Image: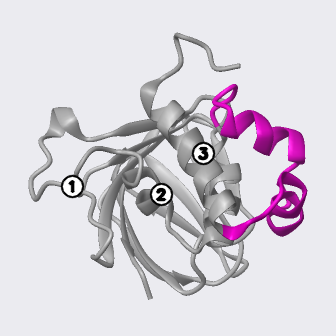
Amino acid sequence: MRHDDSDPVDARLAARLAELRAERGWSLGELAAHSGVSRSTLSRAERAEISPTAATLNRLCHVYGRTMSRLLSEVEAEPAPLLRAGEQPVWEDPGSGFVRRSVSPPHPGLRGELVEGRLTAGADLAYDRPPVPGLEQHIWVLDGTLEVTAQDVEHLLAAGDCLRLRVWGPTRFRCPGPEGVRYVLAVVLP
């Protein structure tokens, strides 16, 4: 049952996740098998009883062949060429200490996008696979320190540093602290 106080973005996201599964003709069990996410979590996410974690959304994006930004843009209003700072959608994963702001105006026909990421001190965000294999990422740290692990190589980034990589396997973003980290993530589809 959907709660009246649920976030409208979460409600639209839930509906879009259900649509994507229906478009493929999959049962919850089949989606669980493809994504590695439990059937009960998928069911609750599609009914907006829970807001999926960043890791869960990443797994679903992988199965559906989209970036997280593209999925989130699909639940936003009509795309515009200009997106004012106060209108940029923000999504939070309170359990992991991750806050994501979609900076670029969403557009399904374009390959690049900008995202602002924030992690609280000690936050550790692991993705078991990229949403799209071969995804190009440019990670530019604005404030704080960020550890990024990709292809079993750990990179320690300080304010001003920028790391460019193509993502083929698991990645990990960790904020060693003592303060949080704020970074820009430029994402380019292959």
Q: According to the image, label 1 marks what residue? A: 79
Which amino acid, mark 3? Pro
Q: Residue at x 44, y 43 (%)?
A: 181
Q: How many marks?
A: 3
Q: Quadrant of residue 189?
A: bottom left
Which amino acid, mark 2? Leu
Residue 28 in picture, x, y percent from top left: 83, 52
Give the vertical position of 55 relative to 179 (above or below): below
Q: According to the image, label 3 marks what residue? A: 176
Name the N-terminal-most of marks 3 and 1.
Answer: 1
Secondary structure that dominates the magenta span: helix
Q: Nearer the viewer, mark 3 or mark 2?
A: 2
For the residue labelled by badge 1, is the local secondary structure a helix, a strand or a loop? loop
Look at the image and give the residue range highlighted in magenta.
24-51
Q: According to the image, label 2 marks what residue? A: 71
Which amino acid, mark 1? Pro
Res 143 seen here: yes
Q: Nearer the viewer, mark 3 or mark 1?
A: 1
Give the vertical position of 178 relative to 78 (above or below): above
Location of the N terminus by quadrant is top right
Name the N-terminal-most of marks 2 and 1.
Answer: 2
Q: Quadrant of residue 152?
A: bottom right
In this orientation, which residue lies closer to the viewer: 21 or 66?
A: 21
For the residue labelled by badge 2, is the local secondary structure a helix, a strand or a loop? helix
Give the vertical position of 98 relative to 154 (above or below): above
Assess disc 1: are there few (<14), some (14-19) or many (≥20) residues with their C-alpha within 10 Å of its C-alpha. few
